[in-house]
Image (cartoon, rainbow, N blue to C red):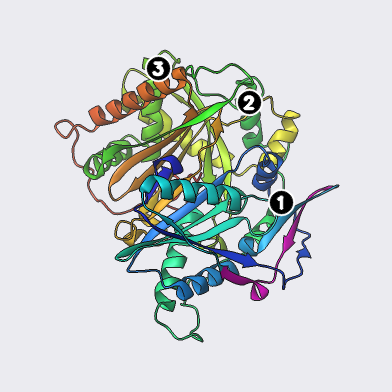
Amino acid sequence: MHVTTIDHYRPAPGEFLSWSVDASGSVAQPSRVPPSFNQSVHLSGADDHSTWLAASFRVSGRIDRDALARAYHALITRHGTLHSSFTKRDNGVTREEHDPRTLVLTENPGVRATSPAALQQAVWATLDAACHPFGFPAYLLAAIDRRDRSTILCGFDHAHVDAYSMSIIIDDLHTLYEGFRGATEDARPQCLPMSGNFVDYCAAEAEMTEVGPSDPRLLSWLRFFDDHGGGPPTFPLDLGLGAGERAPQGADVRPLLDAASTERLAGLCRRNGCSTYGGVLSAMAHAVRRLGGGPELALLFPMHTRRSEPWHNAVGWFTTNAPISVVGTDDLRDTLRRTGPELRRAMRLGGVPIPQVISALGGLSRVRDDIFMVSYVDYRAVPGAAIHDEIDAQHISNVTTADDAQFWISRTIRGLSIRSRYPDTDMGRATITEFLAEVRGILTEAVDARSVPPAGLSSVTSDDLGQSPVNALA
């Protein structure tokens, strides 16, 4: 999986196709299920900018338009959040649900683009227009038709998906499309693994039991926020913005380590009681220290909540957050030995409902609108990972505005990569460029083949962070 941003996306020229979803034959039914906590936060600021996640992959030959329309309809039917919507009312936001059997997909006139730049702009504008959280649908169903090799592309407002959902969608669509391709009109959808309904998950979240007021995990949350002025910590290096200021978003996508070096890093981390993710956090703490940001790197990190079988193949926003402080020392191995236990302790804090934490605090004191965070996904074991390289699977995010730094680490069979989001000021650009160079240099030095023994077994593991190889989701 290549994790990138729309301004870095340069598809080969072709005819840009899209499908509309006609819901006129469906009477939307009000749902008693409230938005999840993540959805509520997202919807409260949804008018400011468009936050969507897109997925693309390649298929051979021209697009079989009938097969793709049928595949998209099957995808919508399969995942409950894709036939639900949000509506603003006087008393707040309500969820509505549509009967997927009544939905009709209609192909729109195609748009021909003769250059990658023109096609990128057409895709970008259409995603921005289609992926708005209010109203139905909140997504774009599309493709790029070419003679020899075409691209299937779709995007979704963040209210309905997370990073892991992009892999599920690619795997489902690839299976469905190839199954319908050349099949008779009455052919049944291809067999896919069981999938739960994210709306059911939201209902369960609304009934989640709070922990006791003296629970050590809740107290740890409160101490963390108290240590940072009553709210989330910010990126510790100067990004050139004052309090309350925002800037156009800068985006950086780059590799950190190749596959062999990543294996050596994983081995180094394991020998020092840490995970690969913890290793990257340790390198970041060292980089911050070297650049004058102090010895402590404090942040929130997202972690998945797909802990039971129904949610493993479900599309939705299945994440919570946990806090961690990583202290950089003079020696990376020493930092790893400190970070491993801290990360395992932080994972346990993810079991505390975030709304309860905020309530116990009496509200968050926010210096920035964006949350400084570092996400990690091991894409080697997500659905469909075995063919990601073959089909050029891509996770594409939008570019909007920013007032803090955010980082997404991805591990694939190619190695370790990082996508960065930051305010694109002169200072912000210079700071992030220098910071990323330091992180890469620290990791490269740590896994120098002349000084680090082989990592040993190269099988995919849970990376010591939880029940799944996917530990932290954007």
Disc 1 marks a residue whose amino acid type is Pro
- Number of marks drawn: 3
As measured in the structure, the alpha-carbon distance from the residue carrying label 3 to the one carrying label 2 is 21 Å
| Front of the two marks 1 and 3 | 1
Near-viewer residue (435 or 251) = 251
- Residue 239 magenta: no
Would you say residue 463 is visible in this rendering?
A: no
| The stretch drawn in magenta includes residue 101 | yes
The magenta stretch is: 91-106
440 relative position to 175: left or right: left
Name the residue located 67 percent from the left edge and 59 percent from the top edge: 136
- Which of discs 3 and 2 lies nearer the camera? The answer is 3
> What amino acid type should be assigned to the residue bearing mark 2?
Phe
Q: CA distance from mark 1 to mark 3?
A: 40 Å
Are there few (<14), some (14-19), or many (20+) residues within 10 Å of tag 1? many
Q: Are marks 3 and 2 in contact (CB under 8 Å)?
A: no
Q: Is residue 69 above or below residue 130?
A: below
Q: Which comes before the other along the chain, label 1 or label 3?
A: 1
* Numbered circle sitting on residue 289: 3
**Structural distance between the alpha carbons of marks 2 and 1:** 25 Å
Q: Which residue is mark 1?
A: 35
Residue behind mark 2: 225
Where residue 461 appears, x then y in whole percent?
35, 52
Question: Residue flagged by tag 3: what amino acid is it?
Answer: Arg
Instruction: Name the N-terminal-most of marks 3 and 2.
Output: 2
Q: Nearer the viewer, mark 2 or mark 1?
A: 1
Which image quarter: residue 57?
Answer: bottom left
- Whichever of labels 2 and 1 marks the residue nearer the N terminus, that label is 1
Q: Secondary structure at mark 1?
A: loop
Where does the image place residue 234, in percent across and percent down from the top left? 55, 24
